[in-house]
Amino acid sequence: MFAIWALVIGGLMVTMGLIGSIVKRMPIAPSALYLLFGVALGPVGAGLILLDLDDPDHVAALEIVTEIAVLISLFGVGLRLRVRMSYRIWRLPVQLASVAMLLTIAGVCAVAVGWLGLPLGVAVLAGAILAPTDPVLASDVQMADTEDRDIVRFSLTGEGGLNDGTAFPFVMLGLGLLGHHELGPGLTRWVAVDLIWATVGGLAIGAALGLLASKTILALRMRFHEAVGLESFFTLGLIGVSYGAALLASTYGFLAVFAAGVAMRQVERDENPNTPPDEVLGTLPVKGLEQVATHEHKAAAYLTQTVSEFSLDVERLAELCVTLLIGAMLTRATFSVPALGCALLLILLIRPLSVYLSTAGMGLRPAQRRLTAWFGIRGIGSLYYLAYSLAHAPDMVQADLLLQITLCTVVVSIVLHGSTATPLMAMYQRVRR
């Protein structure tokens, strides 16, 4: 079996490496191709991937795989945001990750209770699972580089980094309403611990560790010419330390990892506030990279560039693996009328309304609001929250319906958003110019 897996995954990676530039010019996202490969390898096709979410071991494995994928992508998203935290451009992603997300959860919850007749706890879970946008699959509409100041790209990038963590309190609320988590009298514990402390604490822990780690390694490099190389170890280590410390403090690790990435980028920006990293580095020499890594003015830019490149490569691998699993889980039952109806209502009605309401009066042009409202891509984050919910509420009667709704929404989002990302963003860029 391992030999077959090695052949399949290796073949897919080689294939995508060969046709990657062609795919970029096509109105189709790489994730859509991975999805088709997953269907071909799943029970509908060759039967090489058999994932049964009625099996607790399979649920636990899915939770771990999706958790790792989200962590890597959140750190990478944080590294792209090279904008001073005090700038007003941050208002929009924060608004989208808070107010728009709350409105989305409320809309999905209303549909789940009013149309599907689900219990309130399951309805809240459904809203929390489907509310976060995806930082992995949304790469085509996110910032192309750190100097991209387009409000649409910046907002979608920041939103994808934030709301994978800000949705967690509402997952805990849904589990609490089902009797699987302590909410306290009158929701006091949920508000104090799950909503306020876990959110603020996670951001603070991640920012502090990202700042400390970045300044420490830069000091070692610039002053003592030590700690050079192994940026991949540093990347994975900072992700692990931030996540572990946040969980031990009963805070949200997703927010901590995102904040660590943002903090590392802020350190680099403070070193060269008026010069883009590419200009700081210039043309890198074939040999003598150690001199660049320890240079007084280039060390910070070199560190963030190498860390970003590594995290992006791992993120693409994670996207491949998780999207294959999504495709392998698809059956005819996935596209039932309730599941398809919820997916279309979310994408075509609830998301646009929540964005329009939450961004009223914020100075967006009509085209910018339309694009922001449309590109609420759902993906790996939703799959993680689904696995987390199933693991912590194994006796949930409506688990099969929740699975169908989640998978159907992710697939519809990949198809609709993936096929429109390239042409719509190209049209938007032409209008801007």
Image (cartoon, rainbow, N blue to C red):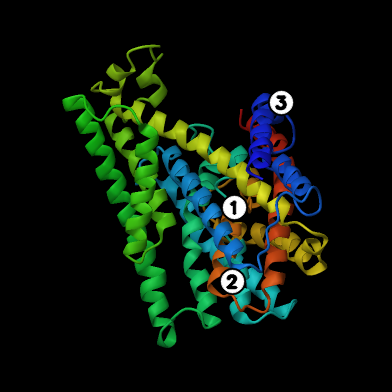
Tell me the residue that label 1 is attached to. 380
Please state if 79 lies on the left or on the right of 325 as rendered.
left
Mark 1 or mark 3: whose residue is earlier in sequence: 3
Corner quadrant of residue 340: bottom right
> How far from the left and from the top, in percent, is residue 334?
77, 62
Neighbor class of circle 1 (other Cα within 10 Å; few <14, some 14-19, many 20+) is: many
Q: Residue at x 68, y 40 (%)?
A: 4
Query: Disc 1 versus disc 2: distance between alpha carbons?
Result: 16 Å
Report if the CB atoms under discs 2 and 3 are less than 8 Å apart: no
> How far from the left and from the top, in percent, is residue 95?
49, 57
Q: Nearer the viewer, residue 266 or 249?
A: 249
> Which of the image's four quarters has the N terminus?
top right
SS at mark 3? helix
Q: Residue at x 69, y 35 (%)?
A: 422
Q: Residue furthest left?
A: 223
> Which of the image's four quarters has the C terminus?
top right
Q: Nearer the viewer, residue 217 or 120?
A: 217
Q: Nearer the viewer, residue 302 or 271?
A: 302
Q: Which mark is residue 125?
A: 2
Which amino acid type is shown beneath numbered disc 3? Answer: Ile
> How far from the left and from the top, in percent, is residue 112?
69, 74
Tell me the residue that label 3 is attached to. 22
Corner quadrant of residue 142: top right
Q: Can residue 146 be seen here?
A: no
